[in-house]
Image (cartoon, helix red, strand yellow):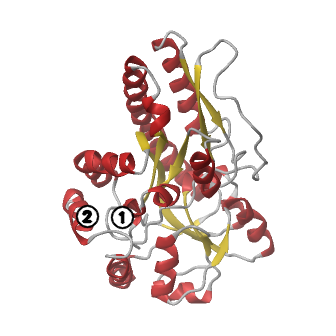
Amino acid sequence: MKYRLALTVALALLASALPGGTIKSANAEGATELRIATLAPSGSSWMKVFNAWNSTLQKETNNTLKLRFYTGGSQGDERDFVRKMRAGQMDGAAITTTGLGMLVRSILVLSLPGVFTEYEELDRVRAELNAQFEEMFDKEGYTLLGWGDVGKTRIFSMHEFARPSDLKQLRPWAWKDDLIFTEFLKVVGANGVRLGVPEVYPALQTKMVDTLPSSALAAVSLQWYTRLKYVTAENDGIIVGATIIRKDKFDALTEEQQKVLLDTGIRAHKALNKSIRRDDDTSYDTILKRGITAINTSAAQAEWDKAAAQVRANLTGRVYSKSLLDAVQRAAGK
């Protein structure tokens, strides 16, 4: 089944949004501090790598530059991260393409259904088009520090299903700001329940929603899988994310600090992707051992592919250009 969700989830919001006060941008010793918001909770796979990145950054800049991560959604949801960056309350964020699309709308091309489903395809796309993507963010006033993964997107449900049309009888969760999944549900004739990430688990408890797209790693981290019974055997995409900072904050750094920040960022995100890919596979095996049933949707593959193609056609020219879509598909080997 080929719907890949850029969203989902971000996967790892374990706490509700808390109000953020005024935050200083430099510590008492005078080191420059970059404030980064993320949905990832403390202790998660993401934060283990990010904390190591911060330690390396401080060491290689002689403690003149550091990162301060605001974890677990303490600064809100991704739309709040974007708002706070624009207002100067945050210097950067680690976000999925849902949040990235609020800054550079056409980046949502990476979340389209049927574009790529394997890591090798994603790696080729990012390698071949990275310079173009960096330029897009630069024009909007942001510097890209590195690309991250969130795991393979699968569809989880309380009920067994196999075809896109089956979603019409279910109550799928749709992230409030996810344009791609909203369009997908529209194409297949389903009605999504639009909620923020912190609202999903309570909605599963009350059965306000009974179906959702997520990576296995996110479903385990958020305990969503404990309320669900089925998961697609075939992954329907790869959730893409990235870490960015305001360009003015990057430009204010010394040349040496800029170089070290970019170099350590590349190394950190390479390590992050390796860790996330491994942990997501482990999480998928874990949920199967704990009673989740894998369902095979391949018999209806033609229907999933048709729906995916319709979504791509509907959004071409509205969200991204045809030339960009063609470039992404070529790089992916489609």
**Residue in view at x 69 percent, y 44 percent:** 72
Relative image position of residue 17 (x, y in whole percent): 75, 52
Q: Residue at x 54, y 81 (%)?
A: 161
Could you tell which of marks 1 and 2 lies nearer the N-terminus?
1
From this viewpoint, is residue 295 visible? no
Q: Which residue is mark 2?
A: 324
Callout 2, which amino acid? Leu
Q: Residue furthest top?
A: 62
Amino acid on which disc 1 is placed: Val
Counting other residues with Cα less than 10 Å from the Cα at mark 1, is it few (<14), some (14-19), or many (20 or more)? many
Looking at the image, which is closer to me, 249 or 99? 249
**In the picture shown, does residue 230 fall above or below 10?**
below
Asked whether residue 255 is in view, the answer is yes
Element at badge 2? helix
Q: Is residue 182 above or below residue 151?
A: below
Q: Residues within 10 Å of mark 2 (few under 14, many from 20)?
A: some
In the rendered structure, the answer to whether residue 334 lies left or right of residue 100 reads left
Numbered circle sitting on residue 121: none
- Whole-percent x and y of residue 210? 67, 75
Image position of 301 with respect to 238: above or below: below
At 46% from the left and 72% from the top, the residue drawn is: 180
Work out whether residue 273 or residue 34 is closer to the camera in this orientation and state it.
34
Left or right: 53 in relation to 223:
left
Identify the element where label 1 is drawn.
helix
Total label count? 2
Residue nearer the viewer, 324 or 271: 324
Is there a contact, CB below 8 Å, between mark 1 and mark 2?
A: yes
Position of the N terminus, as image quadrant, is: bottom left
- Rendered-image quadrant of the C terminus: bottom left
Residue 109 is labelled as 1
- Looking at the image, which residue is at 74% across and 64% down? 199
